[in-house]
Amino acid sequence: MASRRQLSFQDKLKIITEIDDGMKQIEAVKKYGVSQSTIASFLKKGKQIEEAVNSSEINPQRKRLKVATNKNIDSAMDSILINIENKEEEPFQL
């Protein structure tokens, strides 16, 4: 059984670009060691992958596209982490 392999968004976009430039899917399967259905999923989500790579908010080395569902929680966590880094105040006071 093949081991599970995760590719970064940058690698996924590279695969999509190579296939758009004329590489056959079976060649990409052999070159990158992923299944044909995985390649098909990359092609299907090509626009979303391209936006993720070109976005300044997301690191292209990420492997998954999960974003905060609640902006308030995300901003609160950001401020807590910034406070911890700057040691301005204790994040949790009893």
Image (cartoon, rainbow, N blue to C red):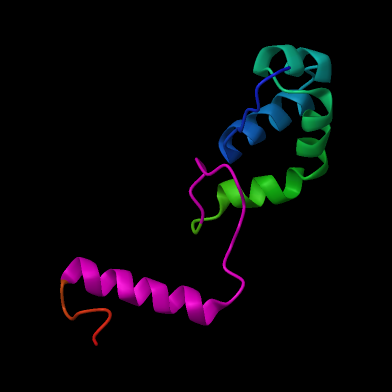
Q: Residue at x 66, y 18 (%)?
A: 32
Residue 18, placed above or below residue 70: above
Q: Residue at x 61, y 57 (%)?
A: 66
Q: Position of residue 72 (x, y in %)?
A: 51, 82
Q: Is residue 49 left or right of residue 21?
A: left
Q: Is residue 81 left or right of residue 68?
A: left
Is 38 colored magenta in this rendering? no
Locate the C terminus by quadrant: bottom left
> Between 72 and 31, which is closer to the camera in this rendering?
72
Q: Magenta span covers which residues?
A: 58-86
Q: Position of residue 62 (x, y in %)?
A: 52, 44
Is 66 colored magenta in this rendering? yes
Q: Position of residue 13 (x, y in %)?
A: 65, 35
Residue 1, placed above or below residue 64: above
Q: Position of residue 52 (x, y in %)?
A: 61, 51
Q: Is residue 94 left or right of residue 12?
A: left
